Structures are given as C-alpha cells and as structure tokens.
C-alpha cells in the first residue's frame, strides 16, 4: 500500500522522487512486502521486494551523506533474498484444534462461521485435541483432482480423548480449527478414535503446508 501511495503522489507531482518521504515510503513498503512474501514462501517476490527495499535504502543513505558507509550494508540487503531463495524455509507451525460444537447458541459457547455454508456453529471453549496429540499428518486426495485434505493420526492419549468426547456427542458437529479458524464442522455419526481428516477447500500447496506445520510441532 505504501508503494502505491508513494507512486500515486509522485505521479500527481505532489512528491519528488528524490525526496526523503518518497524514498522512506519505498523502503518501508518494499521491506514489509518482502517479509510478507517470505512468510508465505513466495521467493520471486522476496527477491523483487528485497531488491526494491535495498535500492530505496541506498537512496536514503546517499541523501543523508553516508552513501559509502551504507554501500556494504545495501549490498548485503540485496544479496540476502537471493541467499534465502536458495534455502528451504522451515515450515510454519500449524495451530490445530478439534472442539465439540453445537448447532444452537448457549451461554459459554463461541459463535463461528462454517466455510462455504450459511450456517454457524457454537464452539465449546476447551479443545479435545491439539497439535500435542498429533503424531503424524499426511496429504490425501480430496473429492476432486485439485482438492486435497490432511489426514492426522493421534497419539494413544489423543485417541482416548477423541473416543470419549465423540461417544457423548453423536449427531452433533465437531469443529476443526486451523490457526484459530474453523475450516470444517462435520457432524459426528460415530466415535472418532485415532484418526481424523481435515477437509477444506485446500489445493495441494495449502494441504502440504498444513501437514508440514503439524508434523513440525
């Protein structure tokens, strides 16, 4: 956003391209974009935005009269995205929870939307299982050729908790949360024990990232 604002103000001749504010907005905007791209592992934009931020930083340094001192730092900034691009980023830990849910509101329950559905569910505050109860997560095919799910296997302690909780919750929904957001809320038709499937509108990349995050813990 900062990059677009700076470009617009310069285009409207309201800001000089060699001015302090223009260079600073370019540096901050490009640096934020570079970091955001790194978080989602999109390395082409890490390189692009990192280079942009480095050039803007050199412009600021040159205007401040410390160009020579900052040249080495600028070169390091420019090279760092390329170095990062050659590395395999560590997977981000996926926050996973399964909670009992209800179809109608009640005191103490938390309202949540269900993806691709006009319905809402009302979550119990305590999770049945979390990342700590997952021993393995794998990507499995979904209902279409472009849709993928994540199968999780629970530890013996996690399986015992799932068995007990779902046995007392038949014909009611159980919510699956990824990073704090409900991705599915299937109705429990039978006891769930040592395995469950995280289904959602995931492509292969998304499902792989979720599984990697669960396996990393």
Image (tube, rainbow, N blue to C red):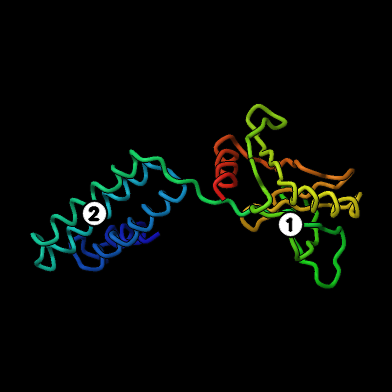
- Look at 37% across and 58% down and name the residue there: 32
Local crowd at mark 2 within 10 Å, few (<14), some, or many (≥20)?
Answer: many
Secondary structure of the residue carrying numbered label 1: strand
- Provide residue 132's location: percent of width, then percent of height: 65, 53
Secondary structure of the residue carrying numbered label 2: helix
Task: Please tell me which residue lies in front, 6 or 111.
Answer: 111
- Provide residue 50's location: percent of width, then percent of height: 30, 50
Which residue, given by chain and number where applicable, does mark 1 sit on? 113
- Look at 33% across and 44% down and name the residue there: 84
Residue 13 is marked as none
Q: Earlier in the sequence, mark 1 or mark 2?
A: 2
Which residue, given by chain and number where applicable, does mark 2 sit on? 54
Considering only vertical position in the picture, is 9 above or below 156? below
Q: Residue furthest toward the front?
A: 156
Rounded to the nearest angstrom, the CA distance separating label 1 from label 2 is 42 Å
Q: Quadrant of residue 41?
A: top left
* Left or right: 68, with 86 as reference point: left
* Left or right: 69, with 32 as reference point: left
- Look at 23% across and 49% down and name the residue there: 78
Task: Please tell me which residue lies in front, 156 or 124.
Answer: 156
Locate the N terminus and report the quarter of the image it occupies.
bottom left
Task: Please tell me which residue lies in front, 205 or 150.
Answer: 150
Considering only vertical position in the picture, is 57 above or below 167? below
Considering only vertical position in the picture, is 75 above or below 69? above
* Left or right: 29, with 195 as reference point: left
Callout 1 touching callout 2 (CB < 8 Å)? no
- Look at 36% across and 52% down and name the residue there: 34
Local crowd at mark 1 within 10 Å, few (<14), some, or many (≥20)?
Answer: some
């Amino acid at each position: 956003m900062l990059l677009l604002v700076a470009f617009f103000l310069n285009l409207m001749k309201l800001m000089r391209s060699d001015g302090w504010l223009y260079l600073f907005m370019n540096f901050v905007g490009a640096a934020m974009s570079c970091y955001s791209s790194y978080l989602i592992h999109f390395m082409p934009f890490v390189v692009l935005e990192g280079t942009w931020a480095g050039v803007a930083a050199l412009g600021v340094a040159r205007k401040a009269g410390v160009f020579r001192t900052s040249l080495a730092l600028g070169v390091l900034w420019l090279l760092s995205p390329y170095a990062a691009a050659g590395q395999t980023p560590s997977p981000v830990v996926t926050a996973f929870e399964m909670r009992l849910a209800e179809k109608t509101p009640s005191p103490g329950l938390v309202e949540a939307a269900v993806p691709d559905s006009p319905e809402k569910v009302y979550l119990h505050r305590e999770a049945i299982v979390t990342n700590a109860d997952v021993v393995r997560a794998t990507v499995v095919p979904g209902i279409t050729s472009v849709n993928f799910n994540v199968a999780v296997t629970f530890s013996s302690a996690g399986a015992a908790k799932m068995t007990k909780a779902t046995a007392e919750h038949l014909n009611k929904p159980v919510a699956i949360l990824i990073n704090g957001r409900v991705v599915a809320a299937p109705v429990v038709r039978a006891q769930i024990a040592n395995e469950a499937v995280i289904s959602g509108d995931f492509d292969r990349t998304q499902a792989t990232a979720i599984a990697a995050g669960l396996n990393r813990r």
